[in-house]
Amino acid sequence: MLLVRAVLLLLVLPSRGQDTTTREPGGLIPLPKGACPGWMAGIPGHPGHNGIPGRDGRDGTPGEKGEKGDSGLAGPKGDSGETGVTGVEGPRGFPGIPGRKGEPGESAYVYRSAFSVGLETRVTVPNVPIRFTKIFYNQQNHYDGSTGKFHCNIPGLYYFSYHITVYLKDVKVSLYKKDKAVLFTYDQYQDKNLDQASGSVLLYLEIGDQVWLQVYGDGENNGLYADNVNDSTFTGFLLYHDTNWSPLT
């Protein structure tokens, strides 16, 4: 074995005095730098393996701004925020335009007109106003006991009623307004018995109108009666006045 190695070594080493440069046509090719004396070029080796990837390069220069894209879909409604602080009160505004005139209202003043009277005597004359001289109420003095007539001083709607005690004769009475009968009542007397006749009506009166009771026909229909325990009465009062009227007009 040692002998074989020695032979190979002699083959590799150049012979003494042998030129260590390779000749090529046109000149000498120098040996590679650092080559040992007696160097001999070998067969090219196989390509090496790929190296590991290098490091990332630096960021490039920013490009030009692109076109605006389409609007995206609306997102869900967010939660309500907290109430803000109340701001400072603003300046007072200008007066508004006056509104339309309202309807006339009820007067604050209460107009009164009323009376209630009774018969004091059995003596009544047919076809003339009956004079009720027993005064129950006549504070405004709109009823005249000397004539038996009510005089309207406040225009409006009035209520009138009468209650007659009938005795000894039949009774026919009528309620007049301005010389015209507007209500009639008849009651036939029953022998030895007291009877009653009554009537009531609503009338619109104007200032100056007069209202009264009157027996019509002959004296045989004049059975009105009154004493200390039986009355024949005549009553009237204003329900409401005409709102278009004023005592100043």
Image: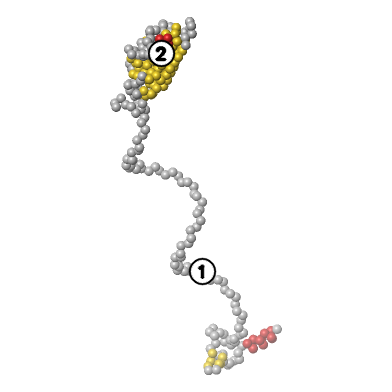
Seen from the viewer's position, the closer of residues 247 and 198 is: 198
Q: Residue furthest right?
A: 1
Seen from the viewer's position, the closer of residues 145 and 111 is: 145
Picture layout, residue 84 above or below residue 11:
above
- Residue at image location 32% in from the left, 42% down from the top: 94
**Amino acid type of the residue that numbered disc 2 sits on in the rendered structure:** Gly
For the C terminus, the image quarter is top left
Is any part of residue 49 visible from this angle?
A: yes
Seen from the viewer's position, the closer of residues 208 and 56 is: 208
- Residue at image location 39% in from the left, 15% down from the top: 213
- Percent from the top left, x then y, of residue 69? 48, 62
Picture layout, residue 167 above or below residue 8:
above
Image check: 140 left or right of 223?
left
**Amino acid type of the residue that numbered disc 1 sits on in the rendered structure:** Asp
Question: Which residue position is annotated with label 2?
Answer: 217
Image check: 10 left or right of 222?
right
- Residue at image location 60% in from the left, 75% down from the top: 49
Q: Residue furthest left?
A: 248
- Percent from the top left, x then y, of residue 136? 38, 12
